[in-house]
Image (cartoon, rainbow, N blue to C red):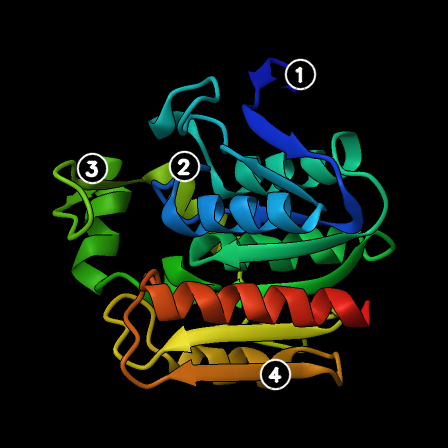
């Protein structure tokens, strides 16, 4: 898919709607464990499913350090507008859980439900120390060692500033569709209490939160994947 000068790589599996659309986390892509597990499940069940890479990630065009949160939100909305058929169930992992909220607000007539996996709304606000924020502002970028890759996690000033402009956890979030949040209590990246805060602020009356006591940030173990698939399948039955 070409979005202006952006070429967004994606895999579109046709099947029964609503279409499940997976939104990866920060510095992740559509080849991750959860994205592929859902793809296999969708194939086995004949379900419509889309996974994609944000601009500058995976197989999509662009320089990673040239991207912003607004760009990636627009990539997600473009997948709804230009690729998905019918109503859509968004599944967002970590940063993808923040972007799915913005996509749902942008397309309330298309988004039928949300499943968040360690959703990380507003992480540009609470996920950095004051010293780190000063470095991002003054030096233009910040590198952190990553526990998931031999490559450092990079945050640019443009990405951080765009994230600050998209914060949600200060007021009611105008989303009315069903939402199910999954979060590990041992998550070292996104404290599980943010799931409860998000649950409180969502306007929808149909919000459920499942806390996995021994779960980490990724929730990629066999039991975690089974929980995710079961959650998605159950929600699809009710939409």
Residues at circles 1 and 2 in contact by the CB criterion of under 8 Å: no
Q: If the image is split into quadrants, where does the C terminus sit?
A: bottom right
Residues at circles 2 and 4 in contact by the CB criterion of under 8 Å: no
Seen from the viewer's position, the closer of residues 21 and 55 is 21
Query: Residue at coordinates 76% horizontally, 41% vertically from top-left?
Result: 15
Q: Secondary structure at mark 3?
A: helix
- Please tell me the numbered disc located at residue 208: 4
Residue 237 in picture, x, y percent from top left? 77, 69
Query: Residue at coordinates 23% horizontally, 70% vertically from top-left?
Result: 188
Residue 13 in picture, x, y percent from top left? 67, 35
Closer to the observer: label 3 or label 2?
2
Q: How far apart are labels 4 and 1 at the CA level?
A: 37 Å
Counting the numbered discs, the total is 4
Residue 56 in picture, x, y percent from top left? 42, 26
Q: Give the residue at mark 2.
A: 31
- The residue at the far front in this view is 44
Residue 230 in picture, x, y percent from top left? 57, 70
Sequence order check, earlier mark of 4 and 1 = 1
Asked whether, in this view, residue 216 is left or right of residue 200, the answer is left
Closer to the observer: label 2 or label 4?
2
Q: Quadrant of residue 166?
A: bottom right
- Please tell me the numbered disc located at residue 4: 1
Q: How far apart are labels 3 and 1 at the CA level?
A: 30 Å
Q: How far apart are labels 3 and 2 at the CA level?
A: 32 Å
């Amino acid at each position: 898919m070409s979005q202006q000068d952006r070429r967004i790589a994606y895999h579109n599996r046709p099947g029964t709607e609503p279409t499940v659309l997976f939104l990866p986390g920060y510095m992740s892509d559509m080849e991750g464990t959860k994205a592929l597990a859902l793809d296999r499940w969708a194939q086995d069940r004949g379900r419509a499913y889309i996974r994609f890479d944000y601009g500058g990630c995976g197989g999509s065009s662009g320089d990673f350090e040239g991207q912003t949160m607004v760009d990636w939100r627009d990539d997600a909305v473009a997948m709804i507008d230009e690729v998905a058929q019918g109503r859509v169930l968004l599944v967002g992992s970590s940063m993808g859980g923040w972007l799915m909220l913005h996509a749902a607000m942008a397309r309330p007539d298309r988004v039928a439900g949300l499943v968040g996996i360690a959703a990380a709304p507003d992480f540009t606000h609470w996920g950095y120390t004051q010293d780190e924020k000063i470095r991002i502002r003054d030096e233009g970028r910040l590198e952190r060692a990553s526990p998931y890759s031999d490559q450092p996690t990079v945050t640019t000033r443009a990405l951080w500033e765009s994230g600050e402009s998209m914060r949600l956890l200060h007021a009611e979030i105008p989303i009315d569709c069903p939402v199910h949040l999954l979060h590990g209590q041992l998550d070292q990246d996104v404290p599980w209490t943010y799931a409860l805060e998000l649950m409180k602020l969502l306007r929808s009356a149909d919000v459920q939160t499942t806390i996995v006591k021994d779960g980490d940030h990724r929730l990629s173990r066999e039991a975690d994947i089974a929980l995710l698939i079961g959650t998605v399948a159950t929600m699809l039955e009710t939409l």
